[in-house]
Amino acid sequence: MNINIFFGFILSSLVIIFVLFKPLDVKKQEFIDVPIFEITSFNMYELNNKGLQGLMIGNSALRYSDRYEVTNIDYTENTKMNISNMKAKRGLYQGETVSLFGNVNYVRADGLTFESQKMIYDKHTSQLSSTTPFLAYKEGNSIKGDSMKYNKKRKFIESQNVKVTYQLQESKI
């Protein structure tokens, strides 16, 4: 057999393989948002030079580079104005914002209580807001509405489509 025919056969085989068969397409998957760690049944304390500023308790949490995702969150905040507690089925703690989802309950030390299915608390502006129907009550007075914004510093509630039950006290003269 002639060596030229042999190399011609090899060359034509390689050309046919190159034309008919595509190279293996290897897909690369980039993991952009991977948890740094996971913790279960925890207490997390926020301390500053003035003392305990916050306490977060939860059943489990995933820590990402920019946030915590917590199940059965119980977050207590201690500020100059008052102490407040927030509970929910799920929570997202990111920077200065605490987002709560599912059976949200916010209670202030003086008894003011908010209930909703979704609330967002901005620690920087001291504003609590809900875009879902809510119930707020204190000492027999209650407010129901479609959405609300509550500013803790100004003690001001802004709401839409409200129904208010207010108990007046009679004065004896």
Image (cartoon, helix red, strand yellow):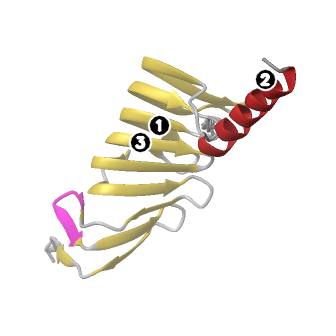
Taking the spot 24% from the left edge, 82% from the top edge, the residue there is 161
In the rendered view, tell whether residue 11 sits above or below residue 144.
above
Residue 91 - label = 3
Q: Report x, y in % for residue 115.
A: 26, 55
| Local SS, label 1 | strand
Alpha carbons under labels 2 and 1: distance apart: 66 Å
Nearer the N terminus, badge 1 or badge 3?
Answer: 1
The part of the image, by quadrant, that contains residue 16 is top right
Mark 1, residue position? 69
The amino acid on which the numbered mark 1 sits, given as a three-letter code, is Glu
| Local SS, label 2 | helix
Q: Report x, y in % for residue 74.
A: 38, 34
Write down the region rendered in magenta.
Answer: 135-144
Mark 2, residue position? 6
The reply to whether callout 3 and callout 2 are in contact (CB within 8 Å) is no
Find out whether residue 171 is within the magenta segment. no
